[in-house]
Image (cartoon, rainbow, N blue to C red):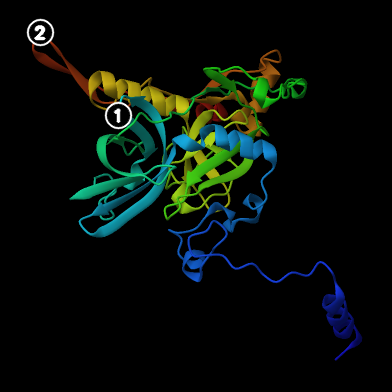
Amino acid sequence: MNYDTYKREWVEAFTPWKREPKEYPDNSPGFSSDYESFNPKRQRFYLHAQNKHLDVYTKMAALKTSTSVVSLESYSGKEEIFQCSGTIIESVDTSSIILTAASLLRCSKARNSIAGDIKVIVHLFDGRAFDGHIEAYDFHYNVAAIRIQSDTPLPIASLAHLNDSIMIRPSQLRVTEEKPFQLRPHSNSFHLIPGDSVIALGRFNKKPYDIMAAPGEFSIDRCDYDYFECKELFMATCRITRCGIGGPLINRYGEIIGICFHDVSSIAFLPINIASIWWEHYKKYRQPRRPRLGMEVTNLYAVDLEILERIISKFPEVMEGIIVEEVCFLLQFFFLVCGKPLFFEWYCVPLFHSCQRK
């Protein structure tokens, strides 16, 4: 035994702060079995070290929304398909709508179709369970609306549509005076800028169905992963587990600003603006509708450096807005005029790529 080993053992033997490890019952929040540790479907958020010790502001923001966060699981016959989280956004009498990820319904063999003989079970914050009925879904945005019939009205979340317009002048990136979240009145709009604190929420899919929180920051990075296939997605540095997919992303005031999707080192999230407009369109037209403008645009602050240089050199006073990255001229469609179908074609031209060739 060398001196360092002897010294360490001697100190450990006499330290007054040494405690025996705690033993948790199987269903307690502190319990983490080997099965849970190695099963990606059954992992709590505190699998990631940054989620283990939450500050009081994160806890208070999460508690403002926690009662409207639910756990969902789906089955095809007796086979389990998916587990995720969701948010109650509407509740009229005993009928409630839950917004979640369409991954809950997706068939494993066919990417854009629902699994056969599907059954959805919803677990509330108090442990009650209800059968879920598929109201609407959209695999493009990966969102779904699930309806449940409960015995009492349920608490709903407060939504805040994102205003992500950001000035590129550094002095404008941060408001110097902030009010504590307790004093902020309810708002239908929230101005989000890179570095702002956000919190991903989820509900664990085993008893006692604990609420989970993963704090992080809104990132300026663009979500370009092929498997997401949705350029409307934003990024945040929160780290969640698979059972948090479909759960809400909230701001520091407890308002829902997005729907979370899982990634290895961060999260992608769909702004709640898009999800809520999708749902309102569905209620009006009874089918998903996505407007086509024939252009692909992005925020000025998110463009590549070389493009931003060319814009600022020509328009030095422009500090915020959007730019058109691509104009679409190849979009075949038809409509009826006097009972006769008329066909049209548009062609896509990358705007800034064309400028580079001139």
- Is residue 298 visible in this depiction of the protein? yes
x and y, in percent, of residue 321 in the image:
59, 18
- Is residue 291 visible in this depiction of the protein? no
Mark sitting earlier along the chain (1/2)? 1
User: Mark 2: which secondary structure?
Assistant: loop
Q: Is residue 249 above or below residue 33?
A: above
Tell me the CA gap for discs 1 and 2: 47 Å
The numbered mark at residue 94 is: 1
The numbered mark at residue 261 is: none
Q: Residue furthest bottom?
A: 1
The numbered mark at residue 338 is: 2
Q: Residue at x 52, y 29 (%)?
A: 257
x and y, in percent, of residue 6 in the image:
87, 85
Residue 332 horizontal side relative to residue 247, left or right: left
Q: Residue furthest top?
A: 338
In the image, 10 versus 303, the foreground residue is 10
In the image, 218 versus 49, the foreground residue is 49
Q: Is residue 268 above or below residue 88?
A: below
In the image, 205 versus 271, the foreground residue is 205
x and y, in percent, of residue 14 in the image:
86, 76
In the image, 156 versus 128, the foreground residue is 128
Q: Residues within 10 Å of mark 1 (few under 14, many from 20)?
A: few
Q: Residue at x 85, y 84 (%)?
A: 5
Q: Residues within 10 Å of mark 2 (few under 14, many from 20)?
A: few
Residue 131 horizontal side relative to residue 7, left or right: left
Disc 1 residue type? Thr
Residue 165 horizontal side relative to residue 230, left or right: right
x and y, in percent, of residue 319 in the image:
67, 17
Callout 1 touching callout 2 (CB < 8 Å): no
Disc 2 residue type? Cys
Locate the C terminus and report the quarter of the image it occupies.
Answer: top right
User: Mark 1: which secondary structure?
Assistant: loop
